[in-house]
C-alpha cells in the first residue's frame, strides 16, 4: 500500500474527514482539513530527499548525477517554498515521510497530536 493511502486510511479510521489535492493551494497538498486549517503532505523519502540520518529509504543516486542532482534539489526547494507559502496563508503543515509510515502506532500518535493541537 502506498504511504499516502496508508495515512488516508488511518485518518479515516480515526474519524477524520478531509479533502484531497486541492490545486488552488501551493504544492497541491495531499490531505487538507479545511475547517481546521491543517494540511498534511506525504513525501516519498527518495523523491523528496528525506534528510534524517535514521531513514533507510532515502539514498543519493550513484549514476547520472548531472540529471538527478538538480532534479532532487528542485523537489526539495519546491517543497520548502510551498510550506512557507502555506504557513503565510495561515495553514498549519505536517510532513509525513514514507519511512514514518512503517510504525503505525507512532504515526497515529503523530497525526492525532497534529490534528488536535
Image (cartoon, rainbow, N blue to C red):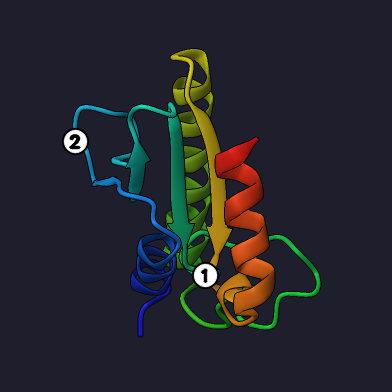
Tell me the mark number nearer the camera, choosing from 2 and 1. 2
94 versus 48 height, above or below? above
Q: Quadrant of residue 61?
A: bottom right
Outermost residue on the left side: it is 23
Closer-to-camera residue (39/80)? 39
Q: Secondary structure at mark 1?
A: helix
Residue 89 visible, this angle: yes
Q: Residue at horizontal 28%, vertical 40%?
A: 28
User: How many labels, in total?
Assistant: 2
Q: Residue at horizontal 46%, vertical 34%?
A: 38
- In the rendered view, does 31 fall on the left or right side of 78? left
Closer-to-camera residue (67/100)? 100
**Image disc number at residue 65:** 1
Q: Secondary structure at mark 2?
A: loop
Q: Residue at horizontal 40%, vertical 74%?
A: 6
Residue 67 in the image: state x and y as whole percent.
42, 65
Closer-to-camera residue (78/87)? 87
Residue labelled with disc 2: 23
Residue 60 visible, this angle: no
- In the rendered view, does 102 fall on the left or right side of 36? right
Closer-to-camera residue (90/44)? 90
Outermost residue on the right side: it is 53
Mark found first going from the N terminus, 2 or 1:
2
Q: Quadrant of residue 86?
A: top left
Q: Residue at horizontal 43%, vertical 66%?
A: 7
Q: Residues within 10 Å of mark 1 (few under 14, many from 20)?
A: few
As measured in the structure, the alpha-carbon distance from the residue carrying label 2 to the one carrying label 1 is 31 Å
Residue 82 in the image: state x and y as whole percent.
44, 32
Amino acid at each position: 500500500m502506498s504511504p499516502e493511502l496508508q495515512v488516508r486510511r488511518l485518518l479515516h479510521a480515526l474519524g477524520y474527514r478531509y479533502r484531497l489535492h486541492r490545486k488552488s493551494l501551493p504544492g497541491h497538498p495531499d490531505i487538507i482539513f479545511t475547517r481546521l486549517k491543517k494540511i498534511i503532505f506525504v513525501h516519498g523519502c527518495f523523491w523528496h530527499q528525506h534528510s534524517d540520518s535514521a531513514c533507510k529509504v532515502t539514498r543519493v543516486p550513484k549514476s547520472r548525477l548531472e540529471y538527478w542532482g538538480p532534479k532532487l534539489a528542485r523537489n526539495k526547494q519546491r517543497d520548502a517554498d510551498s510550506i512557507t507559502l502555506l504557513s503565510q496563508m495561515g495553514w498549519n503543515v505536517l510532513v509525513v515521510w514514507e519511512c514514518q509510515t512503517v510504525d503505525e502506532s507512532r504515526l497515529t500518535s503523530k497525526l492525532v497530536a497534529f490534528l488536535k493541537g
